[in-house]
Image (cartoon, rainbow, N blue to C red):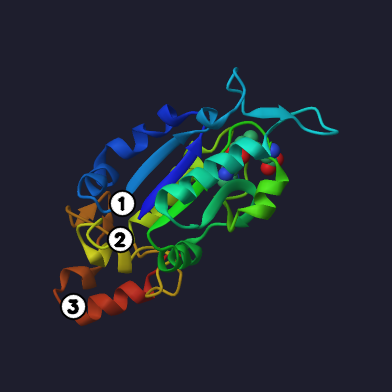
Amino acid sequence: MNFHIITIFPESFKSYFSSSIMDKAMKNNLFSIELYKLNDFSKLSSKRVDDKAYGMHWQVISAEVLSDAIEFIFKKVWKKIPVIYMTPSWELLNQEKVEYFYENLKNDCIIICWHYEWIDERIVELYVDFEISIWEYVLSSWELAASVFIDSFVRNISWVLGNKLSLEEDSFSKKFERKKEYPVYTRPKIFKNLEVPEILLSGNHAEIENWKKNNLHK
Ligand SMILES: C[S@@+](CC[C@H](N)C(=O)[O-])C[C@H]1O[C@@H](n2cnc3c(N)ncnc32)[C@H](O)[C@@H]1O
């Protein structure tokens, strides 16, 4: 999967994906991120990309520059690809939706992210296929929101996680009927008077499987 990200601050996005699982997955070509600096598409000598919103007191990203950036990417990949807009005020992301995106977004998608307030609504009408909110609170910018979405998506790709079981048995998985994962323990067997459930020490895999299902967190 290639994520084409349109932003005014490409540099602020890189750090999260340059360590651990995400970094390894990118180095193994399991997914990629391409950053497009929106200002490069501005026709103004100042390279500004926003303007004052009609009837409001804040700035809005202008339709022309964003449309030019989107069309540039369509041409580059030779086709129209899904466009995602990260915004706090739309559909909330959950594990089921992550799986839906994983199954339905094919090879490429564009993610539009923004600092400050809004993008011109006509971009949403003309281009945006999915509006995604990572939950009901407002962040000051998009990087965290887009990173949350990409990370949750990418861990579904085969080989990104070393152990396939971790994906199947995570909280909110189909296997656990979207409930939260069971508790886990390690040595010592007794810690501050709290004992590890006996069944986990039994070596009986069938019973341990049963125990897991009956001990999912509420
Ligand atoms: C300050 S927010 C804009 C808030 C917007 N004026 C509102 O009231 O909904 C700036 C940017 O951060 C990103 N963002 C902030 N919170 C988010 C969330 N919960 N989910 C997804 N994106 C978010 C979006 O890209 C948004 O355009």
Mark 2–mark 3 Cα distance, whole angstroms, equals 28 Å
Please indicate whether residue 76 sits to the left or right of residue 48 in the image: left
Q: Which residue is mark 3?
A: 205
Mark 3–mark 1 Cα distance, whole angstroms, equals 35 Å
Sequence order check: which comes first, mark 3 or mark 1? Answer: 1
Sequence order check: which comes first, mark 1 or mark 2? Answer: 1
Q: What residue appears at the point 42 percent right and 47 percent down from the top-left corner? A: 76
Label 3 neighbour load within 10 Å: few <14, some 14-19, many 20+: few
Mark 1–mark 2 Cα distance, whole angstroms, equals 9 Å
State yes or no: Cβ of the residue under disc 2 lies below 8 Å from any atom of ligand 1.
no
Q: Which residue is mark 2?
A: 157
Front-lying residue, 160 or 198:
160
Front-lying residue, 190 or 146:
146
For badge 3, the amino acid type reads His
Q: Secondary structure at mark 2?
A: loop
Q: Is residue 200 above or below residue 8?
A: below
Q: Secondary structure at mark 3?
A: helix
Q: Nearer the viewer, mark 3 or mark 1?
A: 1
Image coordinates for residue 70, horizontal then vertical, percent: 54, 45
Q: Is residue 77 above or below residue 62?
A: below
Q: Are marks 1 and 2 in contact (CB under 8 Å)?
A: yes
Image coordinates for residue 188, horizontal then vertical, percent: 17, 52
Tell me if I can see residue 189 in this picture. Answer: yes
For badge 1, the amino acid type reads Phe
Front-lying residue, 29 or 160:
29
Instruction: Please identify the quarter of the rendering in which residue 44 is found.
Output: top right
Label 2 neighbour load within 10 Å: few <14, some 14-19, many 20+: some
Q: Which residue is mark 1?
A: 31
Image coordinates for residue 10, horizontal then vertical, percent: 44, 31
> Quick one: quadrant of the N terminus?
bottom left
Q: Are marks 2 and 3 in contact (CB under 8 Å)?
A: no
For badge 2, the amino acid type reads Ile
